[in-house]
Amino acid sequence: MPADAALASTDTARRWVYPFAQAPAGDKALLGGKGAGLAAMTAAGLPVPPGFTITTEACVAYQDAGHHFPEGLWDQAEAALATVEAAAGRRFGDADDPLLLSVRSGAAVSMPGMMDTVLNLGLTDETVAALAHQTGDERFAYDAYRRFVAMFGEIVMGVEAERFERLMRRAKDQTEGGRDTDLSVDQLKEIVAQSKRVIEGQTRQHFPDRPREQLRQAVAAVFDSWDNDRAVHYRRVHAIPDDIGTGVTVQAMVFGNKGWDSGTGVAFTRDPSTGEKGLYGEYLLNAQGEDVVAGTRTPRPIAEMAGDLPETFDEFRALADRLEATYGDVQDIEFTIEQGTLWLLQTRTAKRSGAAAVRVAVEMVAEGVIDERTAVARVDPDALEALLHPAVDDDADAVLLAEGLPASPGAACGRVAFTSDDAETRAADGEPVVLVRQQTSPEDFHGMVAAVAVVTAEGGMTSHAAVVARGMGTPCVAGASDLRIDPAQGRLHADGHTLVAGDWVTVDGATGRVLLGQVPTKDPDLGDDFHTLMRWADDVRTMGVRANADTGEDAAKARQFGAEGIGLCRTEHMFFGDERLAAMRQMILADGAGEREAALRTLLPFQRADFDALFRAMDGLPVTVRLLDPPLHEFLPDLLELTGRIAETKLALRQAATLDEMDRLLDDSAASRALLRQVEKLHEQNPMLGLRGCRLGMLYPEITRMQVRALFEAAADGVEDGVGVFPEVMVPLVSTAAEIETQAALVREVADAVLAERGVELAYLVGTMIELPRAALRAGDIAATAEFFSFGTNDLTQTTFGLSRDDAGRFLSAYVERGVLPADPFQTLDVDGVGELVRLGTERGRAARAGLKVGICGEHGGDPASVAFFHGVGLDYVSCSPFRVPVARLAAARAALAAEGA
């Protein structure tokens, strides 16, 4: 039966393999992104080498079967291979005219560099001679062979890449030019032989000399790479499901290393860093694809190809324009030129920086390619963060260490780490880290995640470091060739400076500079495109966005980013600072209500001034103020610190030289002991569930009185000055209706008294933070008094899971890695548990009080996935940190669009 007929007769439900020409081009879930793109390009008549795709379903079946191919897969692969042989006019493994193959991964969601690829598959001692005879170029044939043996040895047989690279370095050191292209045929043959000996010595297995066995092992290796450490880590970081699997594309090889009329490259239809329209990318002549992405040779800008191969360049530019028009989005295109003939190996939607995403979306609307709603839906809210981060201050004095390519925008200061493991360790200790490498590989992914910036001495704008850093929004400088890195000694040399691990550097990803030390940064200048996109998002969204802000400065920043009010002012943050903290401690240590009220009178002017700044910054917008929430011991010295201080005083007393010194030390000792007694008195085994929140106000109502008086005196001042003041008083940690009834009555008593004293009329609300499971469950009772709810999802997550956010970091990452939890519940809302409480609390509260205003003020308010859930529940607003406000605005708009399309 002919191959096409054999494939066509396959039971659709059990079909594992599709030739490009027969594949359902739009089905990325089945074929993976690469396979779907190749099918679409083939159907469009573009110059694509023939091939076939093994489906993602086959990968899942392979994993489920204990790493065995599902029944029927290999028969279908053989049939599909026959169609490739027919199209190429060569036979796989043929001793006279061999067909060579590439084997690549391709999941439905792009995971660049995370899984494995094998090129030049099918070469053996027999077929390499045939390839040399067929092409008339023995050097080309053995260069392909040495590449294949090294790649197969690393990817399939598990031999460290460094062992093959060492062989290459030794051979190149014996040439005059020291480049790959300077190696002779005899040297290449010797490298092949040495590489095989390395493989056999480490694995105790012979290098396979049967092409079909090579193919089986390569496909299995690509399937296996779905579960390698870097792929699993990447999926965790980007919230990609574990059960979707990867497709495998098997494709006829075309060769960019057949001479100086051949080459390979990667290009984008627009600049992936800035979004500027125009062909952008890199290429190398007489090279294969891995030479570009691996950074082993520094590639050249794509524009220079117009001088080297002008006709091919014009053809490629026309095809690139056609691809962007077809897909309606920026394309990332891989290509190879074989002796003047252009081949397209892949096209996919390009990953891009936040700045590029915004610019492209806005410009494509202006060009008539997409509409405004599509533009809003297309920009990932998380991508906006790169726009909102600081840049290096142009006026700062900076010492340039090295300059490279601006691979990913943004600026960051950190301590140098030369290995990914060191970067991860330092980051875990709370240090900002800059990962500095000769070049990165997929094995460095965990270090790149930990780093605040990445620097490489080699590689270009499409190298691994550049692509991964851009995808994460991490500043990156690539190809900083002036850096002389010695990771073994833990130091680098640049422009007369020597740095060791732990020294400070500043990375300016926007300009490609690596600077010595900690250089000041400044806030970014958001351009017109950003504000245009945000305006479109605001036109679409139905949910409000507020900010968590505790100072006038934070409030002003939040308003600049589009916040529609303050959803959480944490008043406890106003008590830090020497003068304020002293008064706060005096209040805590007071002996009775009288002394406590005297100390509170000292604090009141500070609170009033802080509230005044907030009201003026938010003129015309609501300000939600949470009454004092944390346990009082947080304002006192640590128990161990006090004990140590007393011990030091005792020692100093023994060494005192004068009576005056002894008197002073005795006074210090007495004060420390008094403070220690109070710290011990306030000590709790579990303070987060102890005397805090509304419980403080219930036991010490004078605290509530002081805060409310300060708040409404500031509000009255604002009203008298013409400021639009809309205060909302939030009572924290309520679990019973009686608590909110008691505290709300006290708030209203004081507020009304102040307004009466000042002769000011002012509408205000009294509500509560829902942060305990009981409060969510009894929300109907609580809503009888509370005029608004704000879900405190940070504490609600803690109390629902029984987790301590401060301590759970020891095991949460392991839970996520092992699939016990889909994500860290403190970063992305646990929809099934905590989310159910939010839903119940909202429904029951509104059932008891029609029109109840409901928001959320935990950090989940700035997480796009969580924002989508809150939209679905019907919350009135989310509140998040000021720099996350634009993220939340866009996420809310996308949630509204998704709901319309549901």
Image (tube, rainbow, N blue to C red):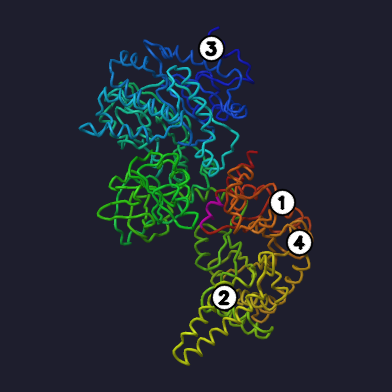
Find the distance from the CA under tag 2 to the CA under tag 4.
46 Å
* Residue drawn where x is 34% and y is 50% of the image: 489
Check disc 4 and give the amino acid type: Ala
Categorize mark 4 by other alpha carbons within 10 Å: few (<14), some (14-19), many (20+).
many
Sequence-wise, the earlier of marks 1 and 4 is: 4
Categorize mark 3 by other alpha carbons within 10 Å: few (<14), some (14-19), many (20+).
some
Sequence-wise, the earlier of marks 3 and 4 is: 3
Check disc 2 and give the amino acid type: Thr
Q: Circle 4 is placed at which residue position? A: 783
Q: Which SS class for mark 1?
A: helix
Residue numbers of the magenta segment: 883-889
* Residue drawn where x is 69% and y is 83% of the image: 593
Q: Circle 2 is placed at which residue position? A: 643
Q: Is residue 443 magenta?
A: no
Numbered disc in front, either 1 or 3: 3
Q: Which mark is residue 822?
A: none
Numbered disc in front, either 2 or 3: 2
CB contact under 8 Å: marks 3 and 4:
no
Q: Which mark is residue 839?
A: 1
Check disc 1 and give the amino acid type: Arg
Is residue 604 at least partly visible in the picture?
no
Q: How many marks?
A: 4
Q: Nearer the viewer, residue 676 or 792?
A: 676
Sequence-wise, the earlier of marks 2 and 3 is: 3
* Residue 523 image point, x, y percent: 42, 58
